[in-house]
């Protein structure tokens, strides 16, 4: 399924882009994060397990077990961001 992934603050800087269209087979956000990490750099460094990262699904903060569907917007960002 196709989704939109957005990156903010230091994650955006390390990814080198603010957003991307992505084709995934993941059912939830935890599986998506692991799928992205498995791609390698820069995903593996930016989204590493153990790093404090917040996730929003369609502009609402959610947990890792939140289910995703086609055309969802997922945003990854550090716990504190500046304006």
Image: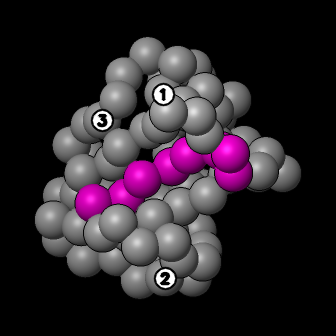
Give SS at disc 3.
strand
Q: Residue at x 60, y 40 (%)?
A: 81
Q: Residue at x 48, y 27 (%)?
A: 12
For residue 4, side relative to residue 40 (left or right):
left
Q: Residue furthest front?
A: 83
Give SS at disc 2.
loop
For residue 76, side relative to residue 64 (left or right):
left
Q: How many marks?
A: 3
Q: Which residue is mark 3?
A: 19
**Which residue is more in the foreground, 35 or 30?**
30
Name the quadrant containing residue 17: top left
* Observer able to see residue 62: yes
Is 8 rendered above or below residue 63? above
- Specify which label sits upstream in the sequence, 2 or 3: 3
Residue 66 image label:
2
Q: Main secondary structure of the magenta part?
A: strand
Residue range of the region highlighted in magenta in the rendering? 73-80
Q: Residue furthest right?
A: 50
Q: Residue at x 37, y 58 (%)?
A: 74
Q: Residue at x 45, y 64 (%)?
A: 56
Residue 78 image label:
none
Q: Which residue is mark 1?
A: 12
């Amino acid at each position: 399924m196709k989704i939109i992934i957005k990156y903010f603050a230091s994650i955006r800087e390390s990814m080198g882009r603010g957003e991307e269209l992505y084709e995934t087979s993941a059912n939830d956000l935890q599986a998506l994060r692991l799928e992205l990490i498995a791609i390698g750099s820069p995903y593996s460094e930016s989204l590493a397990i153990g790093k404090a990262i917040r996730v929003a699904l369609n502009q609402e903060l959610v947990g890792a077990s939140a289910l995703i569907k086609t055309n969802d917007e997922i945003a990854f960002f550090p716990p504190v961001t500046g304006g």
